Image (tube, grey):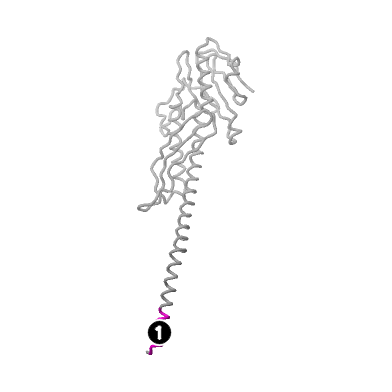
Amino acid sequence: MGNGAQVTLFIILGLVILLLFGLILYWVSAVVPKQAQIQTSTIQNEQAAISGLLEGFLEDAGRRGVYRAGSHGGYIAPEGDEEYTESNPIPDYDLYFYAGSSFPFVLNNEKVSLLSKQQIEERISDYVAIEFNKAVNSSNAFKNLQKPSMPIVKTMINLNDVVIMATYPVKAKKAGAEIIASDVSVSIPVRFGLVYSIAAELVNSIKNNQYYDISKDCSKYGDGKINIYLLPGKDVELHAVRVVDAQPLYQKFYAPFEFRIGIKNKKVQGECVG
């Protein structure tokens, strides 16, 4: 091969090397970051979708738990239900039955047995954990994901809402996989704390009076959206009090929220309506 041909070959080889080097630089600087960006975007979308599902499950279970606790005087199942850790059923003679639900007589003569807010929060948390877990296990979106056997749920009853938080780390079924979702929380727009405080004040007022007329104190109980109804029992000293708040209708189109309590062996009359 002549010198001219060798020079030409070297030039061609040099151009090929430069071209390959340029392609490698392009791949490293443009294609690889783009792939990483796509992968990151996919992971973020998956995280958002899973978190959204978990939040929806939590809100549904939380709403049902809050309303159920209200209709049962703070209990989830006053007649007893092992599934929801209500293992000590209240005897029928200590329960008032109304509209398909039961709730306890929280005042009997001078004895008050109204659950504290903390006790109610614990019962709602237990209920939500079970119902939330059922929803996750029945969803196909979680079939191929690692998840705990039960969530850790905490409930806070506030004056104007109920906040429910769940710790539930979810990740892909592979070694070293990142957590896709972990903590979710929702606010149930129900004035549980306010309604509960009104019910507690009513109990104390009835307890401290030989004969109590609810209607005389309507101004301190209501804000235009809260009504108090008195349901008669089988005799003159068996009653049920329903504290009903219409505010959820204006917040998220929820049904009015009510807290029900039974009163035994006390004389009471009157309502606050309108």
Q: From the viewer's side, name the closer residue of 194 and 12.
A: 12
User: Could you tell me which residue is drawn at 58 percent across and 36 percent down?
Assistant: 252
Q: Is residue 7 magenta?
A: yes
Q: Alpha-carbon neighbours of circle 1 within 10 Å: few (<14), some, or many (≥20)?
A: few
Residue drawn 51% across the image and 17% down it? 203
Q: Which residue is mark 1?
A: 7
Position of residue 236 relative to residue 130, above or below, is: above
- Percent position of residue 214, x then y: 58, 16
Instruction: Work out which quarter of the rendered image holds the N terminus and state it.
Output: bottom left
Residue 104 is covered by the magenta coloring: no
Q: Is residue 274 above or below residue 63?
A: above
Judging depth in this view, the residue of 250 and 145 nearest the camera is 250
Q: Main secondary structure of the magenta part?
A: helix
Residue 160 location, quadrant: top right
Q: Is residue 22 above or below residue 168?
A: below
The residue segment tinted magenta is 2-13
Please state which amino acid type lies under the numbered disc 1. Val
Residue at the outermost bottom position:
2
Q: Position of residue 8 (x, y in %)?
A: 42, 84
Depth order, front residue of 217/22: 22
Which percent across, then down, holds residue 66? 50, 32
Q: Residue at x 62, y 22 (%)?
A: 273
**Which SS class for mark 1?**
helix
In this view, which residue lies farthest toward the left? 175
